[in-house]
Amino acid sequence: MTSRHATGPHIPGIAAGRIDAATLHENFADLHAAYDPHEAAVAADRCYFCHDAPCITACPTAIDIPLFIRQIATGQPEAAAKTIFEQNILGGMCARVCPTETLCEEACVREAAEGKPVEIGRLQRHATDSLMARQGHPFARAAATGKRVAVVGAGPAGLSCAHRLAMHGHDVTIYEAKPRAGGLNEYGIAAYKATNDFAAREVEWLLGIGGITIENGKALGRDITLESLRADYDAVFLGHGLGGVNGLDAEGADRAGVEDAVDFIATLRQSDDLTSLPVGRHVVVIGGGMTAVDAAVQSKLLGAEEVTLAYRRGRDRMGASRFEQDLAASKGVRLLFNVAPRAVHGNGTVREIEFEYTHEVDGRLQGTGETVRLPADQVFRAIGQNLSEDAGLDRAGGKIAVTGPGRTSMQGVWAGGDCTPGEDLTVVAVAEGRDAAEDINDALVG
Amino acid sequence: MADLTTDFLGITSPNPFWLASAPPTDKEYNVRRAFEAGWGGVVWKTLGAEGPPVVNVNGPRYGVIHGADRRVLGINNIELITDRPLEVNLEEMARVKADYPDRALIASIMVPCEEAAWKAILPRVMETGADGIELNFGCPHGMAERGMGSAVGQVPEYIEMVTRWCKTYYDRPVIVKLTPNITDIRKPALAAKNGGADAVSLINTINSITSVNLDAMAPEPMIDGKGTHGGYCGPAVKPIAMNMVAEIARDPETRGLPISGIGGITTWRDAAEFMALGAGNVQVCTAAMTYGFKIVEEMKRGLSAWMDEKGYRSTHDFIGRAVPNVTDWQYLNLNYVTKAQIDQEACIKCGRCYAACEDTSHQAIAMSADRTFTVKDDECVACNLCVDVCPVENCITMQEMAAGAVDPRTGKVVQDQYANWTSHPNNPAAVQAAE
Ligand SMILES: Cc1cc2nc3c(=O)[nH]c(=O)nc-3n(C[C@H](O)[C@H](O)[C@H](O)COP(=O)(O)OP(=O)(O)OC[C@H]3O[C@@H](n4cnc5c(N)ncnc54)[C@H](O)[C@@H]3O)c2cc1C
Ligand SMILES: Cc1cc2nc3c(=O)[nH]c(=O)nc-3n(C[C@H](O)[C@H](O)[C@H](O)COP(=O)(O)O)c2cc1C
Ligand code: SF4
Ligand code: SF4
Ligand code: SF4
């Protein structure tokens, strides 16, 4: 087999155009198709309207799930959407990206009863889609308060906070380092979870409330300082997420072809022609979280011949849910457990990656001494992100320390989302942004 | 396999499942196909008097109540009797009966409340070879405005009079079909009996408005912006129909009068229930209109499997078996005490029992922080609401308290002898119990 005649998945190295445009289009289509109204009615009918429903407790934004499902069942998906948006203004994105299998749907009593929960996520999407398809914004602002709040980062946390503040009549300016708003919704979430430019459409729809200005290309620490924000605004909310990526502690980790999974995904998300996006023939992703799964799956969907997801601990310790793991497996990703990267081999460019098998002894990970080498043209690091910003706030576990609804150690500064402790999920960021906004509102007008 | 052959008024049919007088029995084409599909008999779509037939509306004539997944729970209709000429129907009936001598064929009739009208039509029906007639005193719409259908069925004197005419001019079985749009079903049943009827059949449809179009602000089915009440039928009416059947079956004055049970029968079990309450056979309309003729196959197989299981060799073995257990409230045993009990293994912690009992019943279910639901025996009145709303079958059950035990709610010892309201100390009209 000569490289000159190799096509598609067999093209050696990192190359574009491994599969044709039509297949790519299919590969990156909606992971869960939208319900049609009848499907939604049937799915909604399965909800028992539980007392003090466990699904509500399991939702970080505490959406009144039985109520909105009942509104769908009675033929009012738009009213259902309003119930959702009252708690979670990014209910549309959350419907698409929430790992429902570990949140509301895991708690659903029908999961316990028959292993088939009410499909809350898809119902939420049905409701939010129907309202968002209509012109206009469902909420109105309260009378202007004359107060001004600065928000850093236009990700889920910042947007949710800004929206709630705007609703209360405050004027909000969001400073966003990137050219586009949305945070990881725009740059990180797997493409097949938010198709048709949903992230951008959702931001535009959210801004329909009015009173929010986004200043793109303005980074805290580069273009602006926390001191100036504190001086110029009545309050500040930090929702800048995690800018740094953890490094790979293995020999030769600087060889060409070793990349950050989040950068690969960001490029993919911003690409408007996937046939021109290069990917390796043999791809190895290191990590065990959602980012690792997304990088692996999307590499495979782009046409990589062989994709391996290598995680240093056992399957049960993996951050990605069982659903995500199964999704990866179903797309042809090989899952390798209990292997830790030791060396990246190659002549300037990665050719192989070497792992040592591991086992856990009293909760501590230890190498067994046995190693294995995998061919690799491209290696993705997905072993976690970290806080790159340091505005002089107290920290906890490498993140900005907060008490209650996002109060930082500094008077007048709140924070929420990935940059604060807690699970790194879109829905958690939305909840924290919203709760901080309520607290800011209390502080400003209360 | 149990033998489903049923003898009703001397008319035998291979099974007790007849199609009720309605669109499924409107013409030769339908009835032949119904017989091929296995139906035991049909009551032909109601015939009117000679002359120009009635006309139906030319817009929608049915309304519907849907359950989940558009399951048809009830249909209402504003259709009239047959809109085809009498001669055509009679010819077809004769042909079909000749070709299917083993099946029951009954002629349903509705003509004006005048002796001459009945005297004119009965000999013609006789010539068809039909096994009997059914007098349609039930239609609640349209025909009633013209003094027929339920307009007759609501006046016992008319029922008795017309039945008598029929017994005079016709010598085969006469079945009187009753309307449920009346306060006490026993009155028209008794009138039919007094007029000499061989049987009653019930129920016909119930006056209803199934839905209102909130854009047009008019009831549905809607004809050019207006609607009218129509007759309700299908699974939703079954409980009403069964009570009426049971009332006739157990009343001393009507007891023993053969009954053809109708109203919402959809499965073998529905049929078995009607028959246990005294119906000698059953008639079906909506189920056939919803699923087609083939459903009779499930009914036949199901009834016969159940009969085998129970050791019933013929339908006569169970017809009316539940009638002695239908009684008045005042005769229910007040010394029978039960308590709800929750099977914790089966419970899925939805909390519906708690919401129901706490908000609307007797605050007898406790909910713990970890969502464990338990019945408080000292509050439970055994109303059964929790059992009804629990989504898990047999998760909550009613457990009978043994005689001698103390009911923690009342503090009284459970007695093992039967005692009812008639002798209860709280009853001002109580009969003194024998010393
Ligand atoms: C690849 C990947 C896949 C994921 N998949 C899922 C998923 O399927 N479901 C799920 O629930 N969660 C998922 N997550 C996690 C989820 O995306 C995050 O938890 C969520 O986006 C956090 O929101 P945030 O607003 O705190 O931060 P971000 O979304 O990171 O937004 C922070 C924003 O701040 C901006 N910013 C950063 N620094 C500065 C600065 N100095 N000045 C100004 N602006 C700045 C950034 O450009 C960004 O727009 C995924 C994450 C990744 C990386
Ligand atoms: C469209 C329609 C037309 C009907 N027409 C007649 C009729 O002409 N004569 C009659 O006696 N009953 C008529 N009925 C009543 C049925 O025979 C039957 O009594 C009633 O529908 C209840 O049975 P079910 O619940 O099985 O449908 C009609 C019912 C329907 C739905
Ligand atoms: S737990 Fe499931 S069944 Fe109960 S209210 Fe929530 S979605 Fe409905
Ligand atoms: S039977 Fe009635 S009173 Fe008793 S626990 Fe159930 S709902 Fe409550
Ligand atoms: S209704 Fe049934 S399943 Fe639900 S909590 Fe009560 S006992 Fe358990």
Image: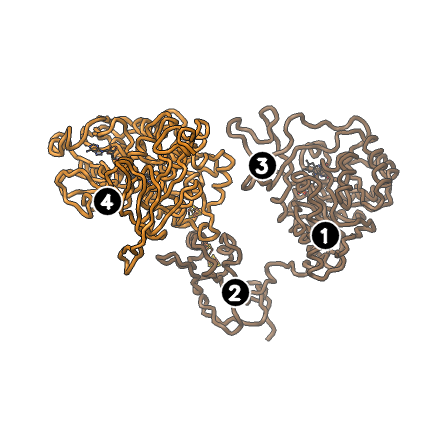
Tell whether B36 sits left or right of A83: right
- Residue B140: quadrant of the picture: top right
Look at the numbered disc 2 and give the secondary structure of its residue: strand
Tell whether A202 sits left or right of B194: left
Which residue is disc 4 drawn over? A251
| Residue located farthest toward the bottom when viewing the structure as drawn | B435
Tell whether B58 sits left or right of A337: right
Which residue is disc 3 drawn over? B210
Q: Is residue B420 above or below residue B385?
A: below
Give the foreground label among 3 and 2: 2
**Badge 2: how crowded within 10 Å, few (<14), some, or many (20+)?**
few
**Badge 4: how crowded within 10 Å, few (<14), some, or many (20+)?**
some
Mark 2 CB in 8 Å range of ligand 4?
A: no
Q: Chain of mark 1?
A: B
Rendering quadrant holding ligand 1:
top left
The residue lying at 36 percent from left, 40 percent from top is A296
Q: CA distance from mark 4 to mark 2?
A: 71 Å
Q: Position of residue A273 (x, y in %)?
A: 37, 25
Look at the numbered disc 1 and give the secondary structure of its residue: strand
Chain A display color: orange
Q: CA distance from mark 1 to mark 4?
A: 88 Å
- Residue B64: quadrant of the picture: top right
Badge 3 and badge 2 in a common chain:
yes
Which residue is disc 1 drawn over? B279
Q: Mark 1 and 4 residues: CB-CB less than 8 Å, in contact?
A: no
